[in-house]
Image (cartoon, rainbow, N blue to C red):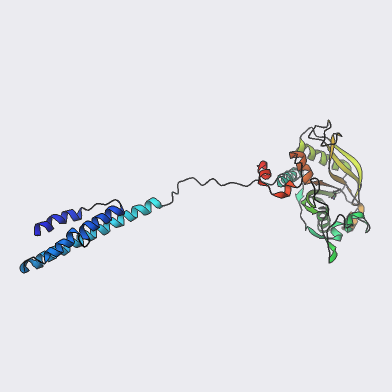
Amino acid sequence: MKEKIESLKSVVSAFEAKTADELEAIRIKYLSKKGIISELFNEFRTVPNEQKREIGQMLNQLRDTAQARLAELKASIEAQKAESEKPDLTRSAEPVALGARHPLSIVRNEIIDIFSRIGFSIAEGPEIEDDWHVFGALNFPPEHPARDMQDTFFIEKNPDILLRTHTSSVQTRTMERVKPPIRILAPGRVYRNEAISYRAHCMFHQVEGLYIDENVSFADLKQALLYFAKEVFGGDTKIRLRPSYFPFTEPSAEMDISCNICGGKGCPFCKQTGWVEIGGCGMVDPNVLDACGIDHERYSGYAFGFGVERITNLKYQVKDLRMFTENDIRFLQQFQ
Ligand code: PHE
C-alpha cells in the first residue's frame, strides 16, 4: 500500500491536461467514487491498526495533492480560454458605410464658397416669417398677387404669419439690424403653394445676395454675377440680363447663363434658345432702403437670388425635381 501511494504521488503531481475534457477524464480516473484514489481509501480499511495513522496521512496528502493539481490545471485552462476570446485590438476597423452629401448641399456650399471669396458672409433668418419681412418691407403693395393664397402658405389663424416665399426676408432683417456696408449671402429653404410635379415643388432652396454700400452700381452687380457664373459653370460661360420686374429692385433683371448642356448652340433643355434662366437680380429699390432705415441718398445696393435646385439641375442634369426629396439612396449615392 505504501509503495502504491508513493508511486502515485509523482503521477498525481505530474498531471497534465490541455482541455476541460482531458481534465475531467483525469478527475474521473483518480478522484471519482470508483477512481484509483477512492479505491485506496476503500483498501485503507484493511490496513492494520498500527499503520493506519501513517498511511492515513499519506492517503490524505495524496488526495490533496491530486485535488490541488487539478485546480491548478483548471485555472490555467480557463485563463487560456479567456485570452483567446479577448478582442483583438490590433485588427483594423469594420468597413463603415459613409453617407454622402446631398446634391443640393454640395451646390449650396459651392455657391457659398464662391461668394465668400469676394467678401460675402452668411446670414440666416426664420422660415416662418411675418408679412412685413417677406413682403411689406420689400415694397410689395398690399394687393400684390404674390401675397395671394396661390403662392404663399399663410398660417390660417394669423394671416400675418406665413412661410417665407423667398430668402429676401433675410435681407430685410439684416438691413434693419446692420449698418452698411452690408455684404451678405442668404441660403435657405423657401415655400410656395405649388402642385408638386417633376418641375415644381412647394419647398425649394434659394441663395440670395445683398450688397449695400456707397456708390454700388449695376456694373458691380453684373461683374459679380459673371464671376459667379464662370466659377460654377466654367470659364466659357456667358451671362445675359433681361429687363424684368420685382417690387424690391429697380431696375430689375432676370439672369440667364449660356446653356451649359449644349454650350449655347441650342438643345431641348434650353428650348433651342442657347440660354437658361437661373435667377433674378437688380438694384435695391430706394423704398426698401427707407423701409429698413437705410439712407437711400447715401447708400445704394444690389441684390440677386438663385434657385439652388435650378443650378443643381444644370450641373448634374437631374430631370425630376422630386428626386431631391425622395431620399432614394440610389440617387443620393451618385454624389460622393
Ligand atoms: N426674391 C426673388 C424671388 O424669389 C429673387 C430676387 C432676389 C430677385 C433678389 C431680385 C433680387 O424670386
The residue positioned farthest toward the top in the image shown: 265
Question: Residue 5, image x and y in percent?
Answer: 13, 58
The residue positioned farthest toward the bottom in the image shown: 49
Whether 159 is drawn above or below 288: the answer is below
Judge from the rendering whether residue 139 lies leftward or rightward of residue 1; answer left or right.
right
Q: Which of the pair 214/220 is nearer the observer?
A: 220
Q: Which of the pair 153/177 is nearer the observer?
A: 153
Judge from the rendering whether residue 211 lies leftward or rightward of residue 327; answer left or right.
right
Which image quadrant is residue 162 in?
A: bottom right
The residue positioned farthest toward the front in the image shown: 34
Q: Which of the pair 249/8 is nearer the observer?
A: 8
Total tally of numbered discs in the picture = 0
Judge from the rendering whether residue 68 lies leftward or rightward of residue 44; answer left or right.
right
Question: Residue 165, image x and y in percent?
Answer: 83, 54
Q: Which of the pair 93/85 is nearer the observer?
A: 85
Whether 205 is drawn above or below 224: the answer is below
Question: Residue 219, image x and y in percent?
Answer: 87, 40
Which image quadrant is residue 218 in?
A: top right
Which image quadrant is residue 1 in?
A: bottom left
Question: Residue 267, image x and y in percent?
Answer: 82, 33
Which quarter of the rendering shows the C terminus? top right
Query: Residue shown at 77%/37% (left/top)?
Result: 233
Query: Residue shown at 12%/63% (left/top)?
Result: 43
Judge from the rendering whether residue 198 lies leftward or rightward of residue 78; answer left or right.
right
